[in-house]
Amino acid sequence: MTKTKIIEWLSTSTRLLANHSEFASLETRVILCHVLEKSREWIVTHPDQELDASQIQKANGLLDRIIEGEPLPYLVGKQAFYGLDFKVTPDVLIPRPETELLIEECITWLEDHPSKRHMADIGTGSGAIAITLADRFEDLEITAIDISEKALEVASQNAACLNVDSKISFVQNDLLSDYDGRFDLIAANLPYIPTEKLKSLPVTRYEPMRALDGGPDGLDLIRKLLQQTREHLKPGGMLILEIEEGQSISASKLVETLLPGVEITILNDLANHPRILKIMV
């Protein structure tokens, strides 16, 4: 195998990947960053640097796996979220841009309520929500809960790498069942995809089914958490949830039934799909 310049490999690989990803140019650069252990800036400023045979083989192998459908973050072991890099493994969902809207709403609420500093992140997964907010607010005390021990291991490692582990308590639990704590803010990105719909989604090939399957209507775990909210959310607090785009009406009706009298707001994501359910008590 002959040597190839970075610019040549990027050009060829981007064309190959273009039919499989709308982010082909970005993803090919991420592959090279991973293979060469260099920054994106370095890749851009060294277009004539030659790749040797082993580097080409490794990069081509990763490219083939992406074309087959394997998520790039699992291949390189990390994903950027809200300006931070998070370790990800097949034990956790890959953090997605839609969840950044939930982060922004939490930031706004916490800035408007400086005395309310006890938070729970339910279904923490990689720890993206808890860690991002811990990084933003020095005085925020967070309990990050997940039923998966392996997910908590990943989240704990992320918290340590980003130097916020002293502000987050990681707890293995089934939502808030048999838990004594009360919080000013509860955030949750729970499984919300209806079981039947999951059968047609490629995401199920690689990401943990337990973190995706929301039951027949997609609301099983959301329903369970709503039932626990009265006991665990302090007066004047906020519960904020990510939902599936087709659940705005059913989720709102569920809140009205289980938490009568609360203030309900539905927020749309950048694609103008209902995505965030915000509840004020």
Image (cartoon, rainbow, N blue to C red):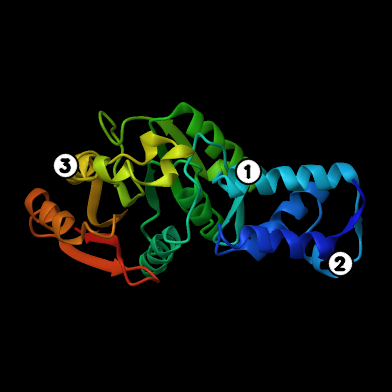
Tell me if label 3 and label 2 are in contact, CB under 8 Å. Answer: no
- Within the image, what quadrant is residue 209 found in? top left
Q: Amino acid at mark 2?
A: Pro
Per the image, the residue denoted by label 1 is 65
Tell me if label 2 and label 1 are in contact, CB under 8 Å. Answer: no
Going by the image, does 230 lie left or right of 164?
left
Per the image, the residue denoted by label 2 is 47
Give residue 17's position: percent from left, percent from top. Answer: 63, 58
Give residue 216's position: percent from left, percent from top. Answer: 19, 40
Give residue 170's position: percent from left, percent from top. Answer: 47, 35
Relative to 44, residue 186 above or below = above
Give residue 19's position: percent from left, percent from top. Answer: 57, 61
- Within the image, what quadrant is residue 75 found in? top right
Residue visible at 28% across and 33% down? 180
- Relative depth, front residue between 19 and 112: 19
- Relative depth, front residue between 31 and 20: 20
Q: Amino acid at mark 1?
A: Arg
Tell me the element at label 2. loop
Residue visible at 82% across and 48% down? 56
Tell me the element at label 3. helix
Q: Amino acid at mark 3?
A: Gln
Tell me the element at label 1. helix
Q: Quadrant of the C terminus?
A: bottom left
Residue visible at 69% across and 45% down? 62
Q: Judge depth for marks 3 and 1 and give the one in front.
A: 1
Q: Quadrant of the N terminus?
A: top right
* Disc sitting over residue 227 in the figure: 3
